[in-house]
Structure formats: structure tokens, C-alpha cells
Image (cartoon, grey):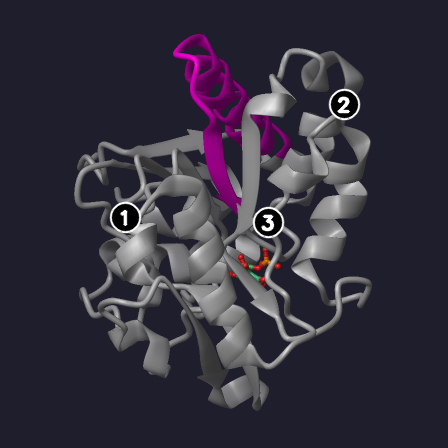
Amino acid sequence: MRNIAANLLVFKDAEAASGETAQRFICGALNAAARGESFFAAIPGGETPRRCFELLARPDLARVVPWDRVHIFFTDERCVPPDHRDSNYRQANELLLSQVPIPDSHVHRFLAETEPTLAAYRYEEEMRQEMGENPRFDLILLGMGGETHTASLFPHSPALHEESRLAVPNYVEKLRSYRLTLTYPVLNAARAVIVLVVGPEKAEALRLALRGEVNPEVHPVQGIQPTDGDLLWIVDRAAASGLIVG
Ligand code: 6PG
């Protein structure tokens, strides 16, 4: 079998893939704490990370995480208040952040209930305040949609062409609405990026992302190429089924 990609880890099922992702988050946080540093992570919304959040909140795992060193940002957000059912912050807060001893001031959410352009500027400012002029996340966790979007970087959307801003509002034609999203410049400046993809419904998208013609305009996840960091795909067998060659 051809070597698909050196940075692809295939797990038995979604549970195992989520477990690996949680372990990597924990190791990153422990390593940062051992160096006496903060651990800056960005997390996505959607269904995929839910299990990983639950695992990180499990008392036996939560206990080993130096939460006072951890800062959580979001890769993207829907333009809704924080208690809205579609809010990525709400989901992460319910499953993880409210369950662990992370200081409130270390949870950095988009003010998505405010005007989107202003919310994006404020978020950029907050990243710079916490991480300096050129923010580098220690770990960015991403999911991938069925048409290969990631964060809220959708095919053919304006944010794909952003070269300097770190966060922007992005009009998504098919949703007929704005999303707030981190951009390639900050996503690709990360020290480590994990793309977690599980389930048979993602098999074709994963095949296109890893084996299809390279064109981030059509397959935005392909634009995730850390310039000086590691990119790791953590997937389950069902999602990887389209990659198997004879
Ligand atoms: C979001 C995201 C988005 C997500 C993909 C996959 O807020 O929706 O951050 O990029 O990761 O759409 O979503 P699922 O995990 O629900 O398939």
C-alpha cells in the first residue's frame, strides 16, 4: 500500500481517535507547564470534538491537566449569543470548560452577539494581548465538514484570501449568514494542528482533502499547512475508508 501521508494516524473508531486527541492536548499542556509557560489552544465547534471534550472533563484526566496554565480560544463561531444552541462556546462550556478548574479569564470567546466586524477585531486584539504581536497557538484542534471546510473557512468564501487579519467575519453563501473565523495566517502559525475526522460520512471529504487535486479554494482544509509547526490528521477507520488502495 502506498504511504498516504506520514502525518495520518488511523484509529479503530471515534472513541479511540478522540482519546488520542485528548491525550495530545494533555501532553501539550503538561509540557508547557513543565517549561513554566502557558498553553494556548484553539478548539472548534461541531459534533466531532464533543467526545474529546467529555474525555478531557473526566475527573481522572482533568486532574492531571494544569488548567491554570491553559488558555482556550475558538477556531470559529456562529454569530449568536453565548447561550444559543448553535454557539460553539456554549457547547465547549457545557461539556468541558464549566467542568474543569480553568480560570474564567483564560476562556477567550468571540463576542459573537456583537457586530461581526467588531467582534473579529476584538478577538484579534485578545489573541495579541495574550500571545504577543504574532500569535502562535501551541495546539489548534480542527474538525472538517463534509465539503472539506474547516474552522469557518468554507469553499469559495472571502476569508480564504485573507493574508494579514487573524480573525474575520466570513459570509458563507450556502448558510446565508456570517460566521466568525480564525484565518490561515494564524492557523498556519501554530506549533501544532490536529485535524480530527471521524465517521463514514466524512470518508469522501477525507479522500478529497488528502488525495484530491490540491485547491484550497474548493477544499479549504488543504490550506492548513503550518509554516513552522506540525500537522497531524487523527481519523477513524470509517473516515479513512476512502483512502485505502489495493
Ligand atoms: C463549526 C466548526 C466546523 C466543524 C466542521 C465539522 O463550528 O461547525 O468549527 O469547522 O469543525 O463543520 O463539523 P462536525 O464535527 O459537526 O461534522
Q: Is residue 186 visible?
A: yes
Specify the amino acid type for callout 3: His
Q: Main secondary structure of the magenta part?
A: helix
Residue at 35 percent of width and 76 percent of height: 159
Task: Identify the image quadrant of the C terminus.
Answer: top left
Please state which of residues 11 and 140 is positioned toward the viewer in this rendering.
Answer: 140
Of marks 2 and 1, the one in the foreground: 1
Task: Identify the image quadrant of the N terminus.
Answer: top left
Checking the image for residue 134, the label placed there is 1
- For disc 2, the neighbor class at 10 Å (few under 14, some 14 to 19, many from 20) is some
Say if the magenta span includes residue 29: yes
Magenta-colored span = 15-43
Residue at 33 percent of width and 48 percent of height: 243
Q: Which residue is mark 2?
A: 58
Ligand 1 positioned in quadrant: bottom right
Q: Residue 102 at x, y = what percent?
A: 69, 30
